[in-house]
Image (tube, grey):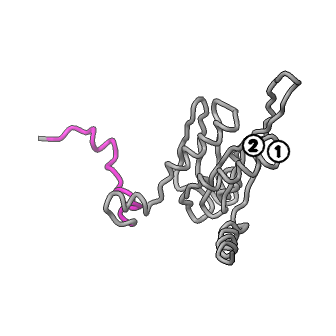
Amino acid sequence: MAREQRGRGRRDRDEAPEFADRLVAINRVSKTVKGGKRFGFAALVVVGDQKGRVGFGKGKAKEVPEAIRKATEAAKRNMVRVPLREGRTLHHDMEGRHGAGKVVMRTAPEGTGIIAGGPMRAVFEMLGVKDVVSKSIGSQNPYNMIRATMDGLRKQASPRMVAQRRGKKVAEVLKRPAAAPTAGAQDAPAEA
């Protein structure tokens, strides 16, 4: 019995409030049966540590709290790590897609804040992004918007990741190429 309690305590410590969660959408659904209608609830939750990890999950149950609990558990299981520049913004501009949903996310200078709509804002807040400009194009369904946002965030690559993949040093990847000669010099015919 002591071993069971010890194991349970360790699990509780691992799930300490290191993660923040945000309820994005709750949907009431009904099923018509012989005696009337049976109601159920579907919840969409985003969970993150606000330091570069984020995940989303959905849960369905007869009661709202149970649906939210299931969604939170699913979100914790589906977390991804996203590299952030200076811990406040994205490394590069990108777009994400899912079904008819398309989102465009752009890096932003310090002090810009989170310029994003509804479900995307929840993802960025839970991720810990402080400056970002984003736009949702297409589907306004919160499920598709979050999936499209997560698709874009999975494509995010830091200079360190690119350097490692290409077998170079970070400085070589960040180095800007030398300026090309002016267009007028190239167009001039060579004298013989």
Figure check: 167 above or below 33: below
Which quadrant is home to the C terminus? Answer: top left
> In the figure, 3 relative to 39: above or below?
below
| Marks 1 and 2, the one that precedes in the sequence | 2
36 horizontally vs 109: left or right: right
- Which quadrant of the view contains residue 30? top right
Indicate the amino acid at tag 1.
Answer: Val
The quarter of the displayed image where residue 138 is located: top right
Q: Amino acid at mark 2?
A: Ala
Label 1 element class:
helix
Looking at the rendering, in which quadrant would you find the N terminus?
bottom right
Badge 1 vs badge 2, beta-carbon distance below 8 Å: yes
Magenta-drawn stretch contains 29: no
Q: Nearer the viewer, residue 32 or 110?
A: 32
* Residue at image point 59% right, 52% down: 78
Picture layout, residue 3 above or below residue 119: below
Question: Furthest-right residue in view?
Answer: 36
Which residues make up the magenta segment?
A: 171-191
The one nearer the camera, 188 or 151, is 151
User: Label 2, on which residue?
Assistant: 43
Q: Position of residue 181 (x, y in %)?
A: 31, 49
Task: Indicate yes or no whether the magenta region holds residue 182.
Answer: yes
Task: Check the image and name the residue furthest to the front.
Answer: 1
Furthest residue in direction top, as rendered: 34
Name the residue that disc number 1 marks: 64
Query: x%, y% of residue 65?
Result: 82, 49
Q: Nearer the viewer, mark 1 or mark 2?
A: 1
